[in-house]
Image (tube, rainbow, N blue to C red):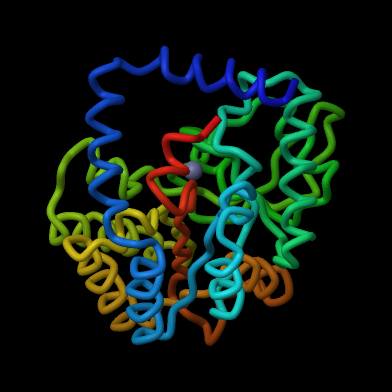
Amino acid sequence: MVNLNRLTSWTRHLRTRRGNRIFLQAVKMFKFHMTPFSILLQRICEVLEEYDSKFTFPLTASTAQSNPILVKWLKSSHHEIAIHGYKHVRYPFLSTKHQFLEIKKSIQVFKELRIPFQGFRAPYNLYSETTKELINKFGFKWDAGIGFHRDYRNGHKFFKIRLKDGKESSYTCIPLCEWSDDRMIDNYNLSSEKMAKILIYHLEKARKVNGLIMYDLHPIRIGQNQYIQSLRRLLIHANKIDAWIPTISEAINYWSKHHQWKDSAPVCCLLTGDIDNFTFFDYIRRI
Ligand SMILES: [Zn+2]
């Protein structure tokens, strides 16, 4: 039943895109996956370490299951891992029951693999009202995808949302910058230099209000040789202005206690990047 439902969700997802575009995207992903994921992650972590920065990786649980060794490596890396669902499907296309089962299964897998988690981001940053309720019911501390909605993406503060019963969500939401790496690379084919300029521009906007900025930089893209410089340039600038670059949980915990950023930093920069698949095989086997 779950698989059938996922199949419907995936088919509907495909129908929303043109066949040609899907093929070109698959070719692009094939090229990206020619670099093993372990190398991409290592490259990213080396740059982060150089600039004393942390990263949060929303990870699909089925992907975690496929490579426990890589997961073990990630767990030992001082960065944070969050739940990105079980499979990479569009939740608004699933029934309440099946959304419940997807999230429940992802939690179960994370517990089996002993991956500590506090946060959630739905695949494609797509949520129905049911998804928002379920995140509350399952007791997640934060959500990192609701903030991508146009009502929130330009904000620079943590926020809560109203649920069906009129009460505030117990979890914290975070605005998510619309300039994700997939937008800059897949849609606009930007160079590393231009990407860095955009990321820095938005960091500066958040600095003006002593706020926060969160980016979605997928390791499969940003970890590539030709794009890693954009991350490095952003971090060089962030270091120069004394930005604070913690994991999401660190930032939320600190803010809730002190109502300011650590060491009175002028801005908090949250680096996140979803891991939807570890290999190209996982990518085409999404159902
Ligand atoms: Zn994703």
Q: Is residue 34 left or right of residue 262?
A: left
Q: Quadrant of the C terminus?
A: top right
Q: Is residue 34 left or right of residue 59?
A: left
Q: Quadrant of the N terminus?
A: top right
Residue 11 image offset from top left, x and y in percent? 50, 16
With respect to residue 190, does 17 lie above or below? above
Q: Quadrant of residue 195?
A: bottom left
With respect to residue 128, does 74 lie above or below? below
Q: Quadrant of residue 133?
A: top right
With respect to residue 237, does 123 lie above or below? above
With respect to residue 169, does 91 lie above or below? above
What's the residue at 17%, 61% (across, down)? 226
What's the residue at 40%, 84% (across, down)? 49
Is 151 in front, or is 101? 101
What's the residue at 38%, 75% (across, down)? 42
Count of marks overlaid on the render: 0
Is 229 in front, or is 258? 229
Is 23 in front, or is 260? 23
Q: Is residue 38 left or right of residue 112?
A: left
Residue 214 image offset from top left, x and y in percent? 46, 57
Residue 166 image offset from top left, x and y in percent? 83, 31
What's the residue at 71%, 62% (across, down)? 117
Is 39 in front, or is 270? 39
Residue 231 image offset from top left, x and y in percent? 29, 67
Q: Quadrant of residue 239?
A: bottom left
